[in-house]
Structures are given as C-alpha cells and as structure tokens.
Amino acid sequence: MSIHASARRDTFPPVSGIPWAELAGVRVGIVLWGGLAVLDLARIAAVSSYAAGAVMVLLVTAASVGAATRAGLGAAGTGWLLIDGFVEHRAGVLGWDGRHDLALLVGMTALALLATRARR
C-alpha cells in the first residue's frame, strides 16, 4: 500500500491563525504562570516591589489585548491576586489594605478592559 502526497494534502484542513480572542483560559494561564515566573525572578534579582508590580500590570495588559471581556477581567483578577499575595504580603498571603488595594484592582481592571477593546 502506498500513500501519495496529493492524497495526504487533501485530508488536512487548511491552517489558519491561532484564535487568540477565543482562548480566554490560555490568556489567564499566561498571566498566572508568567506572573509567578516574573515575581520569582524579581525576588532573586532583588528588584523593588514597584518594579515587580509594574511588570505584572504590563503582563496583564498585554495578555488582555484583543481578548474577550471575561478574559480581561480574569487576567486582571489573577494579576491583582499575584501582586497582593506575592509582592505586598509575601509568601502568598492575601490581605486587604483598603484604598491602596482598591485603587490597584480598579486600575488594573480598567487597563485590562481597555486592552480588550484593542484589535489587531
């Protein structure tokens, strides 16, 4: 039995781009695992907490570009939990510091929602 190249070519669907707008879980996963990696590297390099937080905000914003609204909200919530648990309170302990945490959460959510409106 032999398989001809023309027969194989017809059995595969055409390759198209990756549908990033539909992959909400992947985007939130990028924020979670990428954020953990960023925070580990920041801790090893003894970077200030402001710089680590800024990189996390950039990661959340970048992961939200062109995404669905729920993906942006999920990315913002995940990013806020990482900043709160590993930058502000260390060792994954979550806490609420009033206006500061509210401002961080609202700001990160606003940036993520603005980034979801951007289209390629």
Image (cartoon, grey):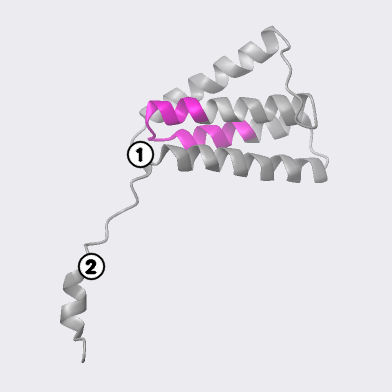
* Residue sitting at the far front: 1
Which residue is the site of mark 2? 12
Which residue is the site of mark 1? 21
In the image, residue 16 lies at what x, y percent?
A: 27, 56
What span is in magenta? 56-74
Q: In what element is the residue under mark 1? A: helix
Q: In the displayed structure, does residue 105 sit left or right of residue 67?
A: right
In the image, residue 20 lies at what x, y percent?
A: 38, 44
Which part of the image, by quadrant, shows the C terminus?
Answer: top left
Magenta stretch containing residue 46, yes or no? no
Residue name at image x 40 percent, y 41 percent? 23
Residue name at image x 66 percent, y 31 percent? 82
In the image, residue 1 lies at what x, y percent?
A: 21, 92
Amino acid identity at mark 2:
Phe
Depth check, front residue: 95 or 83: 95
Q: Are marks 2 and 1 in contact (CB under 8 Å)?
A: no
Vertical position of residue 120 compared to residue 72: above or below: below
Q: Quadrant of residue 35?
A: top right
Amino acid identity at mark 1:
Ala
Numbered mark located on residue 64 in the image: none
Dot 2 surroundings within 10 Å: few (below 14), some, or many (20 or more)? few
